[in-house]
Image (cartoon, rainbow, N blue to C red):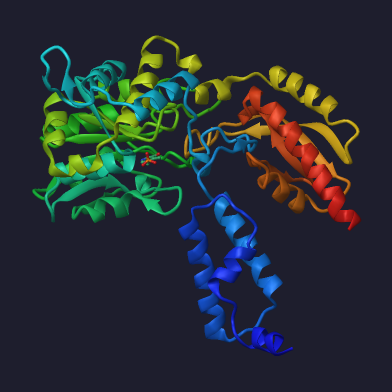
Amino acid sequence: MHEGLNERRSLPAVSKVLDALAPIDLPRPVIVDAVRRRLTVLRKIGTNIPFEELVHSLEVELEQHRRSRLQIVVNATGVVLHTNLGRAPLHPEIAQEMAFAASTYGNVELDLARGTRGSRASYLEHHLALLCGAEAATVVNNCAAALVLMVKHFVSPGQEVLISRGELIQIGGGFRIGEIIAATGARLREVGSTNQTYLEDYEAGIDSNTALILTVHRSNFFMEGFVDSPALAPLAELARRKKLPLIADLGSGALAKFAEISPNPEPTPQEALKCGADLVCFSGDKLFGGPQAGIIAGRSRMIKALKREPVFRALRCDKLRLVALQGTVDLHLRDQSAQVPALQLLQISKDELRARAAVLFDRLRGLPLRVSVGRGSGKPGGGTLPRALIPSITLDIVPEFGTLETFSETLRAHAPPIIGYVSSGSYKLDLRTVFPFQDDILVDAIRSACSTGANNVET
Ligand SMILES: *Cc1c(COP(=O)(O)O)cnc(C)c1O
């Protein structure tokens, strides 16, 4: 009686809560910290929740936290370069090479012929330059970092970067070209209007403060109608005449035009350099199909100078990324682009997807679900090819228990999590982005979602 009263008045000891928690695969200090923080909050607000309830809610919180650990998921969204899901998947052999490199030493900065200190990434830089049709190339952390490095190098604080108003774009979650340039201390000199920028606008914008001309590919949107901007070649001619460097931020790193899937071809590095851009930059993990990286290619003396910038050291890639990049570059150079997973996924035929859907459909018979094979539209994603629609095949599921949202949640709680989407009254799994070896995982996940769901309905 006395003890009961005490228990209701005071909070339980940390150790008592720890003993009561179900085992969970998390480092002990994380669990202890969560318990302590919860008890502190309860002490402050003075709530007296039943012990069982406290333990249960901590278990839920810890489980949610455990699931936030970076892990593989099955991408059934149909978006190939999904930024939230890590953009381009790598070739399994490249991933294997990375695993070896990770667990041992490598000739990262060692010249094996001379036995002396070598330059980092020389093999990769050589091959990248060849691939881009450039004199030289180098890599940094990502394309945003490439922009920062180049603007910092060419533009002293207070000097200006000339850019068209039609190209001051925002990419993904809050990354704006204009803001990143401003963050380097450079000033923006905007020319033209949103939809119309002429060569004369650039020319009129140039004065003694101008240090750089930048063109940016409007990666994730498309303008139609009364739209004009100068081609790269005349802009390059102007830059040369005014003795200004011209940089083209290409964004996607497409090495081909992707004309089969998009009415708006992507600019390629070879083309931009041929048109006279001094340097180009693009992402490693968009249509290039490699790991996160920012690739810079162009004039040799400029690349050399960029690599001497103190900030270059802060933006460099680690050995794992270098391994992944050299593997991807070599696939492109060996004419094996078709084996780059992101490009492979974009090209799978609808018939192949339909055949897989039919097999899955059969395997899901007898479950408390209405399943049909539907049509989806896959997307390149990652802010590339905004007008491309790739016909795809979906598995459309309506469970006979619970809601679509709960079903979707249960599949996200599966190990590995399944990421589909709800649309037009069913839960959809787009097979374009699901690797064939993951079809078994889909079936397992759906089966166990059915048993969880059906049990929940009974109780
Ligand atoms: C995606 C994109 C970037 C940013 O690339 P990250 O590699 O994600 O930093 C910069 N510029 C353009 C034009 C892009 O499309």
Residue 105, given in percent of the width and then of the height, sits at 28, 26
- Residue 194 image offset from top left, x and y in percent: 39, 49
Viewer-proximal residue among 2 and 53: 2
Q: 96 and 357: which one is in front?
A: 96
Q: Is residue 154 visible?
A: no
Horizontal side, residue 203 vs residue 343: left or right: left
Pick whichever, 402 or 112, lies toward us. Answer: 112
In the image, taking residue 183 as reference, residue 226 lies left or right, namely right
How many labels, in total?
Answer: 0
Quarter of the image that includes the C terminus: bottom right
Give x and y (percent) for residue 228.
Answer: 38, 38
**Residue 284 at least partly seen:** yes
Above-or-below relation of 244 to 287: below
Residue at the far front in the pictured view: 2
Q: Is residue 26 above or below residue 301?
A: below
Q: Using the rendered view, name the quadrant where residue 43 is placed.
A: bottom right
Res 11 → quadrant: bottom right
Residue at 24% across, 35% down: 247
**Above or below, comparing residue 19 to residue 452 in the picture:** below
- Residue 263 position within the rendered picture, expressed as x and y whole percent measured from the top left: 53, 28
Q: Quadrant of the N terminus?
A: bottom right
Q: Residue at x 10, y 35 (%)?
A: 243
Residue sitting at 17 percent across and 44 percent down? 311
User: In what quadrant does ligand 1 lie?
Assistant: top left
